[in-house]
């Protein structure tokens, strides 16, 4: 059996949409199947680079750096499950241009649902003005116009959402390798 060509699975959506949960599960499943895989997460990378800000310019630069890293991993045969709010279409398109096989996965959920799921209290802080440039509150989220896959986590359970992503991965990325 021929090993499938690597790809970058880019999970984008509002904070609380479920993108990190799905990306972690997809990463774990790819590893379970013996495929080289890596998980890149916005919160984890920001903890390593705490000076990364939240203005449009700072977010764009951050996504471009992460996208470059993801493209290098892909180039070396590693599947990447990347979970970033990445609110701007231009930044996501820049990353798409760096990668040979880029799959944009829009993890969609209405703002009200994301706010209810917010265990960190970030939306409440943003609404009180304690956090500036918070996506969905005082900074826009540009939903993908043509994502390869959209998963509405307000309508699907976590297991159903994961199954939808893996069905896409099976059909479009792994199927040809068999």
Image (spheres, rainbow, N blue to C red):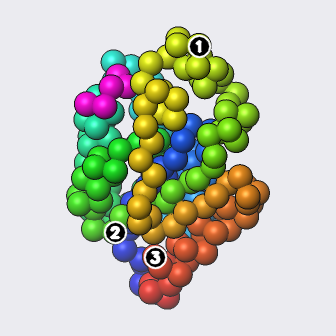
Q: Residues within 10 Å of mark 2 (few under 14, many from 20)?
A: some
What residue is shown at x 56% (from left), y 37% (from top)?
15
Name the residue beneath numbered marker 2. Answer: 101
The verdict on residue 159 being magenta is no
* Label drawn at residue 128: 1
**Measured along the vertical axis of the image, is residue 54 above or below residue 99?**
above
**Measured along the vertical axis of the image, is residue 150 above or below residue 88?**
below
Name the residue beneath numbered marker 3. Answer: 173
Tell whether label 2 touches label 3 (CB within 8 Å): yes
Residue 104 relative to residue 120: left or right: left
Alpha carbon distance from label 3 to label 2: 9 Å
Sequence-wise first label, 3 or 1: 1
Q: Residues within 10 Å of mark 3 (few under 14, many from 20)?
A: some
Q: What stretch is highlighted in magenta?
A: 53-57
Does dot 1 land on a helix, a strand or a loop? Answer: loop
Q: Main secondary structure of the magenta part?
A: loop
């Amino acid at each position: 059996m021929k090993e499938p060509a690597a790809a970058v699975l880019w999970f984008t959506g509002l904070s609380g949409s479920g993108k990190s949960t799905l990306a972690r599960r997809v990463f774990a499943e790819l590893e379970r199947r013996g495929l080289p895989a890596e998980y890149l997460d916005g919160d984890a990378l920001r903890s390593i680079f705490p000076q990364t800000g939240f203005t449009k310019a700072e977010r764009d630069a951050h996504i471009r750096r992460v996208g470059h890293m993801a493209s290098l991993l892909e180039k070396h045969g590693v599947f990447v499950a990347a979970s970033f709010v990445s609110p701007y279409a231009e930044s996501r398109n820049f990353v798409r241009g760096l990668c040979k096989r880029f799959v944009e996965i829009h993890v969609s959920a209405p703002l009200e649902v994301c706010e209810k799921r917010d265990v960190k209290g970030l939306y409440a802080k943003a609404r009180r003005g304690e956090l500036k440039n918070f996506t969905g509150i005082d900074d826009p989220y540009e939903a993908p116009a043509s994502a390869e896959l959209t998963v509405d986590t307000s309508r699907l359970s976590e297991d159903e959402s994961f199954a939808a992503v893996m069905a896409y991965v099976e059909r479009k990325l792994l199927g040809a390798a068999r």
